[in-house]
């Protein structure tokens, strides 16, 4: 994007004409600056709300549980996330991502039906926050693994430019 530059007085241009151009430039600059400030504030508010909701969900997920509640349905969660992302109109977002805060190990009660991990489309970025690593992860080789939540959020929140720009 080209930076806003004030008009330059052209050779032979009347001073009054140049002054009008300069006044229009200044008015447009002030209007654009206040609009950008409002949009930035709106973005920051939405981001803070999103991060707060993420934190609440993570805290709830990692709260102490009784042994009969302490299972992780990684496959079901990933399949649901992919189904959810499939509802996004491709024109409404330039990227899709899933942040999995887990070791990626499917751990469901004995006797539950075994699920299959559906294919994760190539345009979905999968990031796993797992500081310990796991050889039994259902997403081994299919995700970008990071060691902490901040790095995971950085990987999924970053705004990517569309390939055609």
Image (cartoon, rainbow, N blue to C red):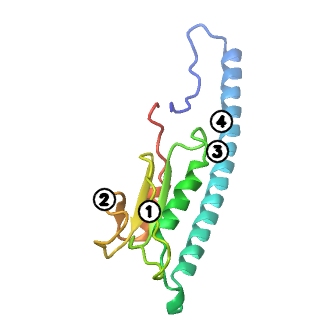
Residue 116 in the image: above or below residue 163: below
Asked if disc 2 and disc 4 are in contact, CB closer than 8 Å, the reply is no
As drawn, which residue projects farthest toward the left? 135
Q: Residues within 10 Å of mark 1 (few under 14, many from 20)?
A: few
Label whose residue precedes the other's in the sequence (3 or 1) = 3
The residue tagged with tag 1: helix, strand or loop? Answer: loop
Mark number displayed over residue 36: 3
Q: Residues within 10 Å of mark 3 (few under 14, many from 20)?
A: few
Given this view, does label 4 or label 3 mark the residue nearer the observer?
3
Disc 3 or 2, which lies upstream in sequence?
Answer: 3
Quarter of the view holding residue 5: top right
On screen, residue 6 above or below 82: above
Residue behind mark 1: 116
Q: CA distance from mark 3 to mark 2?
A: 41 Å
Question: Is residue 47 placed above or below 113 in the rendered structure?
Answer: above
The residue carrying mark 4 is 29
Looking at marks 4 and 3 on the same chain, the residue that comes earlier in the sequence is marked by 4
Q: Nearer the viewer, mark 2 or mark 4?
A: 2
**Distance between the Cα atoms at labels 4 and 1?**
55 Å
Does residue 50 lie above or below 26 as drawn?
below
| Marker disc for residue 91 | none
Residues at circles 3 and 1 in contact by the CB criterion of under 8 Å: no
* Label 4 Cα neighbours within 10 Å, binned few <14 / some 14-19 / many ≥20: some
Disc 3 element: helix
Give the side of residue 41 with respect to residue 111, left or right. Answer: right
Q: Nearer the viewer, residue 54 or 136?
A: 136
| Residue 51 image-quadrant placement | bottom right
Q: CA distance from mark 4 to mark 3?
A: 10 Å
Which residue is found at the position 64% from the left and 45% from the top? 36
């Amino acid at each position: 994007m080209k930076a806003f530059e004030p008009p330059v007085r052209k050779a032979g241009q009347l001073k009054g004409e140049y002054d009008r151009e300069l006044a229009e430039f200044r008015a447009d600059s002030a209007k654009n600056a206040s609009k950008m400030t409002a949009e930035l504030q709106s973005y920051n508010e939405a981001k803070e709300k999103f991060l707060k909701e993420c934190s609440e969900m993570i805290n709830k997920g990692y709260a102490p549980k009784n042994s009969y509640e302490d299972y992780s349905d990684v496959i079901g969660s990933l399949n649901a996330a992919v189904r959810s992302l499939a509802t996004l109109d491709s024109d409404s977002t330039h990227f899709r991502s899933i942040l999995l805060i887990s070791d990626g190990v499917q751990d469901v009660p004995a006797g539950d039906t075994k699920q299959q991990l559906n294919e994760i489309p190539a345009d979905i970025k999968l990031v796993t926050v797992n500081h310990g690593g796991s050889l039994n992860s259902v997403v081994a080789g299919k995700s970008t693994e990071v060691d902490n939540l901040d790095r995971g959020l950085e990987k999924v929140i970053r705004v990517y430019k569309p390939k055609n720009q």
